[in-house]
Image (tube, rainbow, N blue to C red):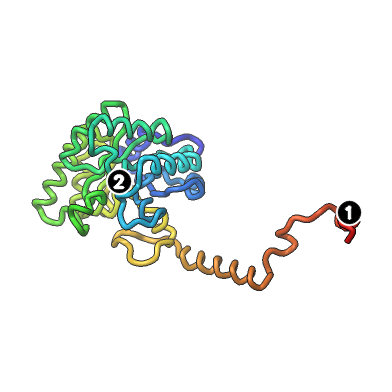
Amino acid sequence: METRITISDLFEAKRSNRKIAAISCYDFTAARLVSQTDIEMIIVGDSASQLVLGYDSTMPVTMDFMTAITAAVRRGAPNVFLVADMPFLSYQVTIPDAIRNAGRFITESGVQMVKIEATSAQLDVIKAVSDAGIAVMAHIGIRPQSISKVGRFKAEATTAEMAAQLINLADLMVRAGAGSLLLEGAAAEVAQIITQRSEVPVISCGSGPCCDGQVLVAPDVLGLTQGPSPKFAKSYENLAERTLKAFQDYSREIKSNEYPDNDHSYHMKPGEVDKLKKILQL
């Protein structure tokens, strides 16, 4: 992509019924590869807590960590639409904290939008950050930062009453100033209704095919994660097995002295070895 994707492009995609491809990645190398495709959006998710740092939830990551990896992603993918995930306690304490931390992502990481996991309790935060001139993606449905309250995640909006509540919440988020919605783990039928009612782009994370766009984490797309994955995750490669083979082949060649060979070594200029032997009196 030569021209940076903007929020106007996302709205135009929605109006044209053209699907938006999004992915979550966390480093310069992966972002540089993404930038060579027609994926329009990267969300630098706090899922880096699990997939990069090895924690068992999204809770431990800090603003300093998130701004650093998001800046790396921007350097790798200068022209994608870049969204940063506001980590736990970066927006829940006070509204001034929320605005200040959202602003850090703009000034330090070069993002175009911040993502906030939101219930009705965060409507004032969504409005305040938006009013400060920062585009906000409201993340509703399954909210990983609420794990300590719910204990275990399950699909959202699977009953009529729950569905009505989620649809109403989506409406409230847009009215509060959200420029986009991320809908995680919601029933596909409800996601379709929210998308049709919403004037802003709706990105699905496990919420069926009828949203304006879809997002998955890069390790799932590449087949790098091992063990159980969410129902909605789809792998387009099996790089875990191929990576294991590459590491094993590397180890084998070192132990058999096949690597490094002459082609993978630096050498002295012709005649310099003999000069060195004379210097060393060898």
Pick the residue in front: 124 or 275. 275
Q: Which of the two labelled residues, at mark 1 and mark 2, occupies the earlier sequence position?
A: 2
Pick the residue in front: 184 or 254. 254
Question: Where's residue 18, x and y in %?
Answer: 35, 44
Give amino acid for label 1: Ile
Q: Quadrant of the C terminus?
A: bottom right
Give amino acid for label 2: Ile
Does any portion of residue 207 appear in the rendered image? yes
Residue carrying label 2: 203
Figure quadrant of residue 55: bottom left
On screen, residue 60 versus residue 26, left or right, reads: left
- Please, is residue 101 above or below residue 34 in the view? above
Residue carrying label 1: 279
Q: CB atoms at circles 1 and 2 under 8 Å apart?
A: no
What kind of element bears circle 1? helix
Residue ID at (66%, 73%): 256
Question: Where's residue 6, x and y in %?
Answer: 39, 34
Few, some or many residues within 10 Å of mark 2 (<14, 14–19, 20+): many
What kind of element bears circle 2? strand
Residue ID at (26%, 26%): 131
- Please, is residue 199 above or below residue 240 in the view? above
Q: Which mark is residue 144?
A: none
Residue ID at (86%, 55%): 276
Does any portion of residue 181 appear in the rendered image? no
Question: Where's residue 279, x and y in %?
Answer: 88, 54
What is the residue that sits farthest to the left in this orientation? Answer: 161
How far separated are the C-alphas under marks 1 and 2? Answer: 69 Å
Count all numbered tags in the image, as a single digit: 2
